[in-house]
Image: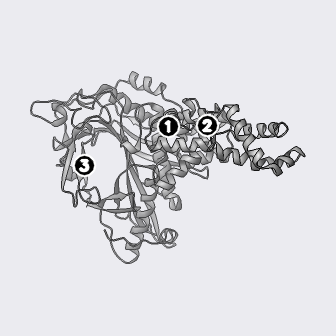
C-alpha cells in the first residue's frame, strides 16, 4: 500500500474546516440475541451460538428481544433523545458472507430514539454538545477471518472463515448529526465523544463496552470544506469518508487526524475526495480505501414484514427514565470529590480515557490512589510501548489484586512491576504469577539479618561509618542486601535492620 501524502495538521486547519460525524455501534449484553433465543456469549467455539433464525433458514421467524428494547430505550433517554411512540424494523438488503439472510434487520425511517445531544468534556475542561440524530436497534453481522496474506484482510488471503456466533447480537447504532466548529480539537473530540458513549453504556449496565472485543465500535466520518473569505458565503459540505469499525479510543483520535491531513493534501492540489469507506491500520497509523460508500437508496430498505411495530407504553418509558444513572459529567465531579484528587490528577485520568478502569479497580478493592498510580503509570507506559489500549492489557480485578499485594507488603513496587508483566503475558492472576515466579518479598528477618551481617562484615569501612553516626553510609549495605535478595526485600525494613545490626556485629 503506497503511503498517502499528508499535509501538516495546522496548515490543513488554516485552509479547510473539518466537519465530523460518528456512528457508534453498541452491542447489548442481553442473554440472548436480538431476534432469536440463541445465546449472546462472547468467546464460544465458532458457529455454536446459532439457531435457524440466525442463519436465515427457510421457515424461521424473528421474535424481538424485549430486554434489548428496554436497553435501547434507556440508552436513548441517556442520550437526551425523544422516544418514538411507535417504531418499526426494516430490512437493509445487501449481500456479504457474514450476513446469512442477505439482509440485516435494522431500523430505517422510524428509529426508536431521535433528536438528542450529549455533553462531551475536553482536556481543557471545555464542554462540547454533540447533536444526536438518532439511535436505532438492529442486529450485528457475523465475523469473517481472512487467512493468509500479510494484512489480515480479504485482499491476498488464501481463504476466509466465517463465524455466525455474532450474527444477530443486539446492537444500538448511535448516529450524530454533522459536528461543526471543533477545529483543532477535532481529533480530541472524536476520542472524548466515544469515551463518553462508553461511560454512558457502562453506567447503564447494558453493554460490556470492551472495544477490543468489538462490543463498542466507531465509524468516523470526516469531510473538509474550504475556508470562506470574509464576505463570501460558506462553502457546501465536502465529500466525506467513513473510517469503519475503529476499535480503540486512541485509534479514533488518530484516524480523524490522519483523514484531515490526507484529505487536505488531496484538496490543496486540486484533487477530489472519493465517498468511500476506509480501513484503519493500527500498525501503520494509516487508513486505506475500502469500498464506495453506499447511500440509503442502495440498500433497498423496506418494512420488515415479520415484525410488528415497537410501541412502548408511556409507563415503561417513565419507569426507565426514573432508573437512569447520573450523567457522566456529574459522575466525574462526584468521583473526583470522593477520591480526593486534584484537578490535574483527575484530568490525567480523563485524558487517558481510564476513568472506567479506575472506577472498576476501586470497586474491586484498591484505593483510589493505588488504582490511579497503576493505570496512569506502569500500565499506560506498557500500553504506549506496545501501541495497545491500556484497557485491553489487564483487568481491573487483577490491578486491584496487584495493588493489594503491595499494600500488604507481599510485593514491593519493583516486584509488582514484574508481576504485572507476567499478568499481561497471560501467566495468570497476580497471586499465581507471584507463586510461579517466586517473587514475594522476603519477610523472614532471619534471612535478612544473615544477608545484612555478611554485607556489613564485607564492608568494614562502611560499618565503622555507621557506628560513628553517619547513617547515610548505610545505603551501600542496603544496596548489597537488596542485590543478594534479588530485589525481594522491603528496603525500609532492610534499613532498619542494618542500623540495628551495625551496633551488634
Q: CA distance from mark 3 to mark 2?
A: 42 Å
SS assignment at label 1: helix
Q: Residue at x 35, y 43 (%)?
A: 214
Along the line of sight, the residue nearer the viewer: 56 or 399: 399
Tell me the residue that label 3 is attached to: 145
Q: Secondary structure at mark 2?
A: loop
Which mark identifies residue 150?
none
Q: Is residue 333 visible?
A: no
Q: Point out which mark residue 433 bears.
A: 1
Looking at this view, name the residue that lies furthest to the bottom. Answer: 269
Mark closest to the chain's N terminus, 3 or 2: 3
Give the image location of residue 314, x and y in percent.
38, 24
Q: Say which quadrant the C terminus sits in.
A: top right
Judged left or right of residue 18, residue 378 is right
Q: Which residue is mark 2?
A: 411
Circle nearer the viewer, 1 or 3: 1
Give x and y (percent) for residue 486.
Answer: 61, 44
What residue occupies the far right of the structure in this picture? Answer: 468
How far apart marks 1 and 3 lie (CA) works out to 33 Å
Q: Is 373 on the left or on the right of 130, as rendered?
A: right
In the picture, measured across the screen, residue 443 lies left or right of residue 175, that is right
Looking at the image, tell me whether mark 2 or mark 1 is earlier in sequence order: 2
Residue drawn at x 28%, y 42% as measured from the top left: 109
**Mark 3 Cα-neighbour bin, 10 Å: few <14, some 14–19, many ≥20:** some
Amino acid at each position: 500500500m503506497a503511503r498517502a501524502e499528508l499535509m501538516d495538521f495546522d496548515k490543513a486547519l488554516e485552509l479547510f474546516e473539518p466537519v465530523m460525524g460518528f456512528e457508534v455501534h453498541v452491542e447489548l449484553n442481553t442473554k440472548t440475541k436480538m431476534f432469536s433465543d440463541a445465546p449472546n456469549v462472547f468467546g464460544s467455539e465458532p458457529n455454536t451460538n446459532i439457531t435457524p433464525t440466525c442463519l436465515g433458514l427457510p421457515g424461521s421467524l424473528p421474535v424481538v428481544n424485549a430486554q434489548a428494547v428496554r436497553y435501547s430505550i434507556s440508552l436513548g433517554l441517556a442520550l437526551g433523545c425523544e422516544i418514538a411512540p411507535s417504531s418499526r424494523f426494516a430490512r437493509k438488503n445487501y449481500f456479504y458472507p457474514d450476513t446469512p439472510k442477505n439482509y440485516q434487520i435494522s431500523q430505517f425511517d422510524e428509529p426508536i430514539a431521535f433528536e438528542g445531544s450529549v455533553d462531551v468534556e475536553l482536556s481543557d475542561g471545555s464542554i462540547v454538545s454533540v447533536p444526536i440524530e438518532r439511535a436505532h436497534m438492529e442486529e450485528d453481522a457475523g465475523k469473517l477471518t481472512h487467512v493468509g496474506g500479510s494484512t489480515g484482510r480479504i485482499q491476498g488471503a488464501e481463504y476466509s472463515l466465517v463465524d455466525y456466533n455474532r450474527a444477530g447480537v443486539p446492537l444500538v447504532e448511535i448516529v450524530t448529526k454533522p459536528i461543526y466548529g471543533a477545529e483543532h480539537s477535532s481529533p480530541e473530540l472524536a476520542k472524548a465523544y466515544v469515551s463518553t458513549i462508553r461511560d454512558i453504556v457502562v453506567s447503564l449496565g447494558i453493554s460490556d463496552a470492551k472495544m477490543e472485543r468489538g462490543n463498542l465500535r466507531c465509524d468516523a466520518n470526516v469531510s473538509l470544506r474550504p475556508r470562506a473569505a470574509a464576505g463570501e458565503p460558506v462553502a457546501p459540505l465536502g465529500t466525506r469518508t467513513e473510517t469503519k469499525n475503529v476499535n480503540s479510543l486512541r485509534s479514533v483520535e488518530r484516524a480523524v487526524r490522519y483523514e484531515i491531513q490526507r484529505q487536505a493534501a488531496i484538496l490543496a492540489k486540486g484533487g477530489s475526495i472519493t465517498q468511500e469507506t476506509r480501513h484503519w491500520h493500527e500498525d501503520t497509523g494509516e487508513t486505506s480505501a475500502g469500498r464506495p460508500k453506499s447511500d440509503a437508496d442502495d440498500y433497498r430498505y423496506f418494512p420488515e414484514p415479520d415484525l410488528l411495530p415497537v410501541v412502548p407504553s408511556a409507563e415503561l418509558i417513565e419507569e426507565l427514565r426514573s432508573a437512569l444513572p447520573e450523567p457522566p459529567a456529574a459522575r466525574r465531579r462526584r468521583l473526583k470529590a470522593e477520591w480526593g484528587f486534584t484537578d490535574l490528577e483527575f484530568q490525567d485520568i480523563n485524558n487517558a480515557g481510564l476513568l472506567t478502569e479506575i472506577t472498576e479497580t476501586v470497586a474491586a478493592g484498591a484505593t483510589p490512589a493505588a488504582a490511579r498510580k497503576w493505570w496512569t503509570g506502569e500500565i499506560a507506559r506498557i500500553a504506549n510501548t506496545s501501541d495497545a489500549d491500556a484497557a485491553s492489557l489487564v483487568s481491573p480485578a487483577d490491578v486491584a489484586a496487584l495493588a493489594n499485594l503491595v499494600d500488604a507488603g507481599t510485593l514491593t513496587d519493583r516486584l509488582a512491576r514484574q508481576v504485572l508483566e507476567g499478568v499481561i503475558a497471560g501467566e495468570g492472576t497476580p497471586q499465581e504469577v507471584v507463586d510461579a515466579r517466586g517473587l514475594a518479598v522476603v519477610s523472614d528477618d532471619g534471612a535478612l539479618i544473615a544477608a545484612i551481617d555478611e554485607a556489613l562484615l564485607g564492608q568494614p569501612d562502611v560499618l565503622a561509618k555507621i557506628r560513628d553516626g553517619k547513617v547515610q553510609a548505610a545505603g551501600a549495605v542496603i544496596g548489597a542486601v537488596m542485590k543478594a535478595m534479588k530485589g525481594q526485600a522491603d528496603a525500609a525494613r532492610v534499613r532498619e535492620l542494618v542500623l540495628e545490626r551495625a551496633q551488634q556485629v
